[in-house]
Amino acid sequence: MSQPDRPQPTALPSVAARVLAFVVILAAGAAGGFIGFAFVDLQCDGDCGAATGLGALVGAVLFAGGTAVVAVLTLRAMGEWRTIQERSRAAERASRRPPRVR
């Protein structure tokens, strides 16, 4: 007899993990924007609207981009870890099964 169809393990992270990663990326972008703004604002005298805006934009993009890279790598590692655990559980279940008599 054949085994009942079991769903294949997936490396896709949970929805909560993806939402958390998205929120963290947004927060890092906001922090980078504030830091970029402050960095340029401290060094500039007079009317520096364009320069501080550009500093905020560059800071936000760099921080959000860096955090996105770390978040994607973390989510992939979580998914791979879950797949490895499922495979080891399946192998353990298979080893506990009594041998088939023909």
Image (cartoon, rainbow, N blue to C red):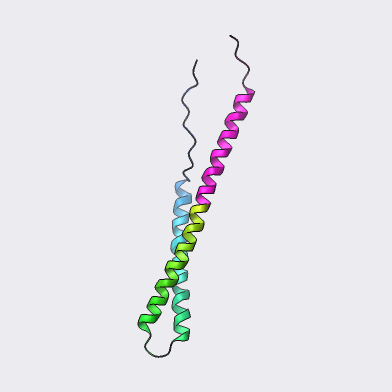
Give residue 11's position: percent from left, percent from top: 49, 42
- Which stretch is magenta? 74-100
**Measuring 44% from the left and 53% from the top, which residue is drawn there?**
19
In the image, is residue 86 above or below residue 13? above
Q: How many marks?
A: 0
Give residue 20's position: percent from left, percent from top: 47, 55
Q: Is residue 54 magenta?
A: no
Q: Quadrant of the C terminus?
A: top right
| Magenta stretch secondary structure, dominant | helix
**Measuring 51% from the left and 44% from the top, which residue is drawn there?**
79
Q: Is residue 86 magenta?
A: yes
In the image, is residue 22 above or below residue 82? below
In the image, is residue 74 above or below residue 51? above
In the image, is residue 94 above or below residue 88? above
**Measuring 47% from the left and 66% from the top, which residue is drawn there?**
63
Is 94 positioned to the left or the right of 16 in the image? right
- Looking at this view, name the residue that lies furthest to the bottom: 46
**Measuring 51% from the left and 53% from the top, which residue is drawn there?**
73
- Looking at this view, name the residue that lies furthest to the top: 102
Which of the 4 image quarters holds residue 46?
Answer: bottom left
Which of the 4 image quarters holds residue 33?
Answer: bottom left
Give residue 89's position: percent from left, percent from top: 59, 32
Give residue 101's position: percent from left, percent from top: 60, 10
